[in-house]
Amino acid sequence: MKKITLSTLAALALTATVSANDITIIKKDSQDFALGKETKINMKFNAQDVKEMWLKMGVRIQGTFEGKKTTDSTGVSTTNQDAYLRRTRLEVQAGFSKTASFVMDIRNDKVNYEDKGEQTFNVGDAYIKIKKPFGSDAVNFKLYRAKIDISRTETVKSARVIAYDRPYVADEAAQYITHNRRGTNAQAYGKLFDGKIKYQVAVGDATYSGKMKDSEGNSFDKGIVDSQTFFYGGKVKLSPFTGWEEKTVTETYMGKGKHFTVGASYWKVDDIQLDNNTSGTNGLTRSLMNAELSPHYKGAFIQAEYFEFDGVVENATDFVTSVNTTTGKSNGWYVTGEYVFTDLNYIAPFFRYESWDKLSGKDGYNLRSRLAGINWYLRGNTTKMGLIVQRDDYGVNLKNGGDKVESVRITTQWFF
């Protein structure tokens, strides 16, 4: 039998320590919540032989139980109760070197929502990130399916938004320039002057016909896009006050820190050709302007955004059957806020107000939404639950013309 020496025991102890430290999940700077410390995004496994290589894996599940009442323009009401998985995702990240990594997730969202059944899984993010290739934060790159910053709330990871369902006007912006704000693209981004200035520029695959809608809320026919040019554009964000620079794009700060950020973006698709058997091909030019304001101080957070769409179509059917149909503009905004009571187990009341004129200059195209709720961060964003009350009022010319929709949702999240 081999003799076990003190040096052998020390080496074994050191090996065990190194191995344990090569798998990490807990955020070191996390507060102590009711169920423990918050976890980082995914569990990280470091390679033993090449320290620059690593793998991250994790899951995200958001569940919703909802009761909804719809009252039409004649006063007739209908009710519906629904339970569904708002988001179901498997997330994977891989580091190849000090500069290169890969991010991907596989998702099946809105499982059992209304009458949609189980649906199918698809790829969400799928991009190569090249970080600090020139040794500074001034220039970084992402290639393939990465988000373009058409909106702050749409850029924030859905595990870190206050309410799981984002504003309607922001969701429209997410589809207006490129599919789900992450159609295959190439982008450069970075920060300057210690994070006081941040930017992103990108070019890539433009709109998807299956997500194109007119001002009334009707969908275009799938496959109607015959050809189109690349989208292009960019965003600039400023944090003008020293000590108030934005470190992470989020809506959930858990009562820590402070930031103040303003930003603006402009995105455009020069030509979208719609193929139509009746009257030939019609062209669209689309552009989107976005402005944002976002400060927070410890438990208090507020966020506001404004959107202006150019090239919107009033009625999809009329547009594709008439070469003389003109396009118009649309604009909308929202403001949302939250206060986290750190001394009350991280209970956080919040609100949101949204107004969207879906066709400027014409009556009956307004959508107004009011939302209030409360979140309970049981373990930060790792485990949280919420209660939301919402009312939406639809203009008479919209798809849900004249409807008033009231809903109550109980939400939960499990994320690590």
Image (cartoon, rainbow, N blue to C red):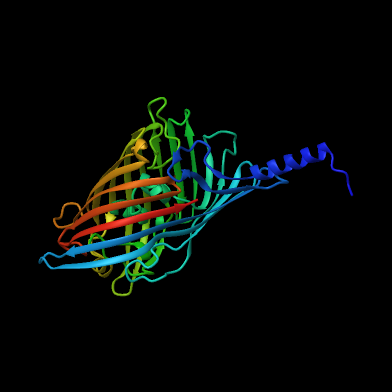
Q: Nearer the viewer, residue 192 or 12?
A: 12
Q: Residue at x 45, y 42 (%)?
A: 200
The residue lying toward the viewer, choosing from 125 and 207, is 125
Residue extending furthest right? Answer: 1
Left or right position of 195 against 367: right
Rendering coords of residue 339 (x, y %): 31, 38
| Residue sticking out furthest to the top | 242
Residue 244's place in the image compared with 230, above or below, is above
Q: Is residue 87 visible?
A: yes
Query: Looking at this rendering, what residue extends furthest in the left direction?
Result: 74
Q: Position of residue 302 (x, y in %)?
A: 30, 38
Residue 219 can be seen in this image: no
**Where on the picture, by quarter, is residue 108?**
bottom left
Q: Is residue 337 left or right of residue 251?
A: left
Residue 361, horizontal then vertical, whole percent: 16, 52
Q: Identify the residue shown where x is 38% and y is 63%.
A: 110
Direction from residue 30 to residue 68 in the image, left or right: left
Q: Is residue 169 above or below residue 302?
A: below
Q: Residue at x 47, y 28 (%)?
A: 193
Q: As drawn, is 362 to the left or to the right of 100?
A: left
| Image spot of residue 3 (x, y percent) | 88, 44
